Structure formats: structure tokens, C-alpha cells
Image: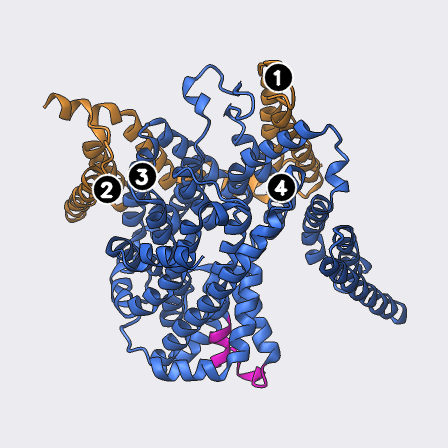
């Protein structure tokens, strides 16, 4: 084990090319995170074509640099201009911007920077500790369980992507359908090709992804004539000197907030589809509730900066746990990373860490290293950020559209892929206009083939469909899927309604059943605790209903 | 009952599902044991049809979409709203259509220059800037992919003859 870790360490830290690529990746990530309208996912997607010519570890390390850099890049724009660069830094604006306006920009940036660093480090430790354990758990999964897990990943993406659940489900199903076009992997039979030979290979998922996400986003960005022609940011801020020492001391004094926020971030990252945009607000809310200085929140409270920044960087580690351990991408960024691995013929799954230990530990180490780069590059990237913000959106969008075309062509050296990107770009643009969330469709495309493969395996082993509900893990994921579909209705329901009061306790009781069926002592204890807590909540809430 | 944007989208989706379900009957069955090639797409399409039907019913039960009746839907406003996106579509189709003749280098430069000028404006100073930006950016990208990543980008008939 130690020799594998040392080898992985050498492949990252002692290889100047990999280090150089990570450095550039982190810088690009910080800038992508800092520019409003440019999400981290966009940054990672645009990095992807460059990784085709790299080794798997170099490609992943570069993308991790972008990923980590992106989470901390958002703090620059939100603190200096009051405009969050990414949705994952929205809550940082609440106290970061007032702190800057009160004359402490160096301290505000320092707090954000070092909270991101510490949050990332905590999640990196959890990633290293938890991913192999979760992978062992994944070895228990049969095709029935995998199929149900994919269904759960899709339904939770639908319920958390916001908006209309019907449209979310339609988007997810369209994604699943897009993945069926071409020769099927089980029988080698052509489907929905309509006589076109190009369709036989199916739609490569990266052109689809780049089209749906990046292409459609760029079209949206230039939609408004006035906005497209004006510089990216009207307020561009100024270069400030970061107060590192004082910021570190303040954060360490507030270690409870740091750890709580980091764990919120990790947990949110593990959940499919719940990314940094949710974790930073959750962590901020919890920090506010727990703080004795609650009234200072919104006026430049240190805890209000530490919580969201620690949480959003910790989310990155959480998201990687699912991808590394089970091969299920939790969000668009990890879906792209999964795609990058597939280009190198590596399919992540429960055996990934065992089969490709060098690559797996390389990812862990790259995740650590990226955080050091992120801290080191902040001052330099701040200067570049101030220059980039002067460029109008239409210039950036035009150049990136051309870059997307070149990048997509580089994937298989076929022009058809560029047409695919364009076609899905147009679809993505109109879907956005019509209120369909794109994340479920993207995950549908990514997970479609995997879902079909596992369904085929399951039906090949046994015709008994009841296995989907009689196997504990499969039942657990299917119940989770049902609970996640109902979740948006729970969010919309009035707080004093019967449904709203019963949703959580009944979900807990229902979920305890498959855990109990798993048989192992630990899971039976967890199951009993879930039942007891559920019953307690049920009793409290129903009795409060009676009194009202 | 009312008709709004969602109603039209739902009807379109139902038509799409109908065509695809019909097309799924043509999927060959090689006679192997196990799941047929048409099974999974049929399930997905059936679910998609059901959800589209739900969307149709919900949209018809919802109040009339003001957008359909308001001034927003008059052709001039629709054109203005989608003007820039339409320019991007058109330029991209032209770029792809002429890729075999122009190649990635010339085609890319012309695409970026054309798009910049159509989106940014036709003043002389801007046009010069756009030309410089398009040559530099595409030149750098082309060099990185051709020499750095060893990707053979479409050369185009013009450069080939030249």
C-alpha cells in the first residue's frame, strides 16, 4: 500500500509536467470561478479537450486543479464587487462584501482563502478515509442494486435541480433516451439510426455534454445585446494584500464552525446533485444559528465568511467520494471527470481503487496539492481576474464557441461530433428557455448506458423482477428515489400541514426497513436508531397537531 | 382549459415519443437470450410519453400563459430576443458547412471574426480589433492542438491545394 501511495505521490509531485498542468488548471479554475456567468462546471468542461493528449493521471490532476480553484475563485468577485462568481459563493457575499466595505479587504480575502483551504483539507482526509470503505460497500452491489442506485441518482438530481418536477423527469428521460441511440452494447443491434451510418456509434457523451451545458450557456450569455457588449463586470475592484497570518488565527479560533461547515460540505457533496450551491447556504445558515453574534451576520461577521467558504471547498471532496467509490457522478463536474477516465478506457466502479490504485491515490494526492496551489496562486490570479473582467461577454463567448468546436473534434477526429455538440447545444438552449433543468438530462446521458447494462445483467441472471424490491440495497435506493421525488412537494407544502410534518419521520421509518434487512449488526443498530428517531418525531409532530 | 407554451412543448414531445416508439418496432431482434435491444428504449419512451401527457394535462389546467397573448410574442420582439442566438446558430452552421473547404484554421478565424463583428458592431476600430482577436486566438488554439496535442485538425481544400 505504502509503495503505491509513494508512486502516486511521485507521479504528481515529482513530475514537473503534471505539476505545471495542475498549476495552469488551478489558475484557470480560479478565473472561471471568479467570473460571473462562468461556472466551475464550465471551466472543467472546457479543460477536457486539452486532457485528451495527456495521461489519465495528468488529465485528472489538471481537472482537479480547475475544480478546486473554481470553488475558491468565486470568493474574489463576491468579496471585491459583491457579485458572486459562482452559485457556490452566494452566501460568502452576505458577510464577505460588508467586511470588505468596512475597510478590511485583505482580511476578508484571507478568511475566505484559508477557510477554503482548511475546508478542502478536511474533505481530502475524509475522501481518502471514506472512498475505499464506500467502495468495499459497493462490492456488495449486484446489478439490481446498481440499477436502483442510478434511478435514485437521477430522481434526486431532478428534485434538487429546482423548478418543475415533471419537466425535470422529462429532461432525465430525454437524456436516457439520447443514450440509447446507436448500437446497443449488449446485442450490437443498431437503434434509432434512421439509415445514417454516423448514428451507429451513438452520440459520444462528451460532445453531448459540452453542447448541452457549455454551448447553450454561451448562447444564453450573449442573448441580451446590451449585456453582451458591456465588460464582464462593471465594478472590477482593486488589488489588495491578503492578511494571511491574522486570517489563519481567526479561523483556527473558530474551529467548531470550520469543522461543522466542512462536514456539511462533504455530506452535501456525497449526495448526488447537491453541490456547492446548496452547501454554502446550509453552512452559513447553521453558522448563524449556532453563533452568539447572530445579529452581526450580514454586517461582516467572520463566521459568515468562514462557513460558506469551508463548506463549498469541502463539497468537492464529497462529490469525488461517490465517483471514486461507486462510479456514479454526483454532478456535472464529476460526470466530466468520469468521461475523462472513460477516454483512457478506465471505468470507475467499486473495484476502481483496487484495480487502479496508482490512479486512485494519484487523484487523492492531486486533490491535496491543488489546495496548496490555490492558496499560492490567489494573489497572481487576482491581477489576471481584474484584467479579464474588462473583456466583453460577446468576445469571450465567440472565442469559446470556436474552442468548443476544436476541442470536440479532437475527441475522435470526426466532424460529426461537432454537429452533435451543435445539435445538443440548440436543444439545451431551448430547454433552458422553456424551463427544463439540464442537469437531469446530462446525468441521464451519462448514466443511461450503465442503467441499461445493469438491467440487462439483472434480467440475464434472473427473470424475477421482485429482486428489485427484495434485495435490501436495491429496495433502499428505490425508497430513496421515491422519497426524493416527493421532496419538492415537501418543500412547497405549508409548514403546519400534515404532509409537511409527517414527511421526515415516515421517510426515516421507511428507510430503516432495508437497512434492517441487510443483517449486519451495525446496520441493524442504525436501522433501530432511525425507527426510534422517526417514531419520536412522529409522536412530537402529531401531538403538536392535536394541540393546534 | 388553456393553451400555453408548455402545452405546445408537451404535444411536440408526445409526437416525438410516437415517432420513436414506432421506430422502436424496427429494432432488429437477433434472437439472443436475455433482454431485447428494444426493451430499454421502449420503457424510457413509455415513461417519457406518460410524463409528457402529465405535462399536457397540467399545462391545460393551468391559467393561460400571458406570454402567448402579450406583446412579447409579436414577431419583432421574438426576433430581438433570439437575434444573437440565431446569429450564433447561423454562423456555426456556416462554419460547419464550409469546414471541408476552409479547414479549421481559416474557417475558425472567419467564424470568430464573423461572429464578433455581427454581435459586437461594424465600426472600423472594432472590426480591426475583431480581426486581431480572431487571428490570435484561433492561431494559438490551432497551434496548441496541432503541435502540442498532435491532433490532426481538418486542413480544408483551400490549404491542401495551396
Residue in the foreground of this view, choosing between B146 and A159: B146
Give the residue at mark 2: B117
Query: In terms of secondary structure, where does tag 3 sit?
Result: helix
* Label 2 Cα neighbours within 10 Å, binned few <14 / some 14-19 / many ≥20: many
SS for dot 1: loop
Q: Kindly report the distance in space between the C-alpha atoms of the residues bearing marks 4 and 2.
A: 51 Å
Which circle's residue, 1 or 2, is located before the other in the chain? Answer: 1
Residue A391 at what x, y percent from top left? 26, 56
User: Which residue bears the numbered disc 3?
Assistant: A407
Q: Position of residue A437 (x, y in %)?
A: 54, 45
Q: Residue B31 versus residue A141: which sits nearer the camera?
A: A141
Q: Which colour is chain B painted?
A: orange
Residue tagged 1:
B32
Q: CA distance from mark 1 to mark 4?
A: 23 Å
Residue A95 vertical position relative to residue B63 in the rendered view, above or below: below
Q: Residues within 10 Å of mark 1 (few under 14, many from 20)?
A: few
Name the quarter where the C terminus of chain B is drawn. top left
Q: Which mark is residue A146?
A: 4
In front: mark 1 or mark 2? Answer: 1
Which callout, 3 or 4, points at the residue further toward the start of the chain? 4
The disc numbered 2 marks a residue on which chain? B
Residue A67 can be seen, yes or no: no
Span highlighted in magenta in the image: A291-307
| Nearest the eye: A157 or A128 | A128
Callout 4: SS: helix
Tell me whether marks 1 and 4 sit on the same chain: no
Q: Position of residue A500 (x, y in %)?
A: 76, 60
Circle 3/circle 4 CB separation < 8 Å: no
Chain A rendering hue: blue
Residue A248's place in the image compared with A196, above or below, is: below
**In the rendered image, residues at marks 3 and 1 fall on the same chain:** no
Amino acid at each position: 500500500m505504502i509503495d503505491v501511495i509513494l508512486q502516486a505521490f511521485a507521479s504528481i509531485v515529482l513530475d514537473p509536467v503534471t505539476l505545471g498542468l495542475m498549476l495552469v488548471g488551478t489558475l484557470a479554475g480560479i478565473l472561471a470561478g471568479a467570473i460571473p456567468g462562468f461556472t466551475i462546471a464550465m471551466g472543467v468542461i472546457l479543460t477536457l479537450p486539452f486532457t485528451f493528449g495527456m495521461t489519465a493521471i495528468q488529465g485528472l490532476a489538471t481537472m482537479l486543479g480547475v475544480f478546486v480553484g473554481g470553488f475558491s475563485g468565486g470568493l474574489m468577485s463576491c468579496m471585491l464587487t459583491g457579485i458572486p462568481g459562482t452559485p457556490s459563493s452566494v452566501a460568502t457575499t452576505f458577510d464577505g462584501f460588508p467586511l470588505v466595505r468596512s475597510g478590511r479587504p485583505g482580511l476578508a480575502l484571507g478568511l475566505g482563502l484559508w477557510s477554503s483551504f482548511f475546508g478542502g483539507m478536511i474533505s481530502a482526509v475524509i475522501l481518502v478515509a471514506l472512498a475505499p470503505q464506500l467502495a468495499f460497500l459497493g462490492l456488495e452491489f449486484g446489478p439490481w442494486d446498481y440499477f436502483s442506485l442510478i434511478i435514485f441518482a437521477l430522481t434526486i438530481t431532478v428534485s434538487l435541480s429546482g423548478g418543475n418536477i415533471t419537466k425535470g423527469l422529462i429532461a432525465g428521460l430525454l437524456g436516457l433516451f439520447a443514450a440509447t441511440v446507436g448500437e446497443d452494447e449488449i446485442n450490437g443491434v443498431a437503434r434509432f439510426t434512421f439509415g445514417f451510418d454516423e448514428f451507429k456509434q451513438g452520440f459520444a457523451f462528451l460532445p453531448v455534454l459540452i453542447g448541452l451545458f457549455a454551448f447553450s450557456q454561451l448562447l444564453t450569455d450573449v442573448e441580451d445585446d446590451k449585456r453582451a457588449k458591456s465588460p464582464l463586470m462593471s465594478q472590477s475592484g482593486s488589488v489588495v494584500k491578503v492578511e494571511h497570518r491574522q486570517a489563519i488565527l481567526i479561523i483556527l479560533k473558530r474551529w467548531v464552525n470550520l469543522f461543522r461547515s466542512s462536514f456539511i460540505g462533504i455530506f452535501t457533496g456525497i449526495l448526488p446533485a447537491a453541490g456547492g450551491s446548496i452547501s454554502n447556504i446550509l453552512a452559513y445558515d447553521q453558522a448563524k444559528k449556532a453563533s452568539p453574534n447572530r445579529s452581526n451576520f450580514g454586517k461582516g461577521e467572520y463566521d459568515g465568511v468562514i462557513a460558506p467558504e469551508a463548506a463549498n471547498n469541502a463539497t468537492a471532496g464529497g462529490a469525488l467520494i461517490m465517483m471514486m467509490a461507486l462510479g456514479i457522478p454526483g454532478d456535472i463536474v464529476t460526470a466530466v471527470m468520469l468521461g475523462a477516465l472513460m477516454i483512457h478506457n478506465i471505468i470507475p466502479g467499486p473495484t476502481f481503487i483496487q484495480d487502479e490504485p496508482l490512479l486512485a491515490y494519484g487523484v487523492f494526492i492531486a486533490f491535496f496539492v491543488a489546495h496548496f496551489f490555490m492558496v499560492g496562486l490567489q494573489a497572481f490570479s487576482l491581477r489576471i481576474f481584474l484584467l479579464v473582467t474588462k473583456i466583453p461577454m460577446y468576445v469571450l463567448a465567440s472565442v469559446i464557441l470556436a474552442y468548443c468546436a476544436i476541442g470536440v473534434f479532437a475527441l475522435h477526429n470526426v466532424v460529426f461530433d461537432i454537429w452533435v455538440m451543435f445539435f445538443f447545444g440548440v436543444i439545451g438552449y431551448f430547454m433552458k428557455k422553456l424551463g427544463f433543468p439540464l442537469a437531469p438530462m446530462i446525468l441521464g446521458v451519462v448514466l443511461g448506458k450503465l442503467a441499461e447494462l445493469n438491467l440487462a445483467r439483472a434480467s440475464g441472471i434472473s427473470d424475477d423482477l421482485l429482486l428489485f424490491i427484495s434485495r435490501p440495497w436495491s429496495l433502499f435506493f428505490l425508497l430513496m428515489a421515491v422519497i426524493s421525488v416527493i421532496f419538492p412537494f415537501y418543500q412547497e407544502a405549508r409548514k403546519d400541514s400534515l404532509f409537511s410534518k409527517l414527511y421526515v419521520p415516515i421517510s426515516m421509518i421507511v428507510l430503516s426497513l432495508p437497512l434492517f434487512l441487510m443483517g449486519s449488526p451495525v446496520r441493524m443498530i442504525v436501522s433501530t436508531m432511525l425507527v426510534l428517531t422517526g417514531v419520536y418525531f412522529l409522536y412530537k409532530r402529531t401531538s403538536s397537531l392535536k394541540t393546534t | 382549459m388553456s393553451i400555453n407554451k408548455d402545452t405546445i412543448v408537451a404535444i411536440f414531445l408526445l409526437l416525438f415519443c410516437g415517432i420513436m416508439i414506432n421506430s422502436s418496432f424496427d429494432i432488429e431482434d437477433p434472437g439472443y437470450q436475455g433482454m431485447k435491444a428494444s426493451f430499454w428504449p421502449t420503457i424510457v419512451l413509455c415513461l417519457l410519453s406518460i410524463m409528457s401527457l402529465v405535462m399536457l394535462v397540467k399545462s391545460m389546467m393551468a391559467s393561460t400563459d400571458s406570454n402567448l397573448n402579450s406583446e412579447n410574442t409579436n414577431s419583432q420582439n421574438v426576433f430581438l430576443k433570439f437575434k444573437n442566438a440565431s446569429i450564433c446558430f447561423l454562423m456555426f452552421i456556416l462554419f460547419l458547412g464550409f469546414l471541408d473547404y476552409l479547414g479549421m484554421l481559416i474557417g475558425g478565424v472567419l467564424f470568430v471574426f464573423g461572429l464578433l463583428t455581427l454581435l459586437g458592431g461594424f465600426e472600423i476600430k472594432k472590426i480591426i480589433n475583431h480581426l486581431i482577436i480572431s487571428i490570435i486566438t484561433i492561431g494559438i488554439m490551432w497551434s496548441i492542438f496541432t503541435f502540442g496535442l498532435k491532433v490532426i485538425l481538418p486542413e480544408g481544400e483551400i490549404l491542401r491545394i495551396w
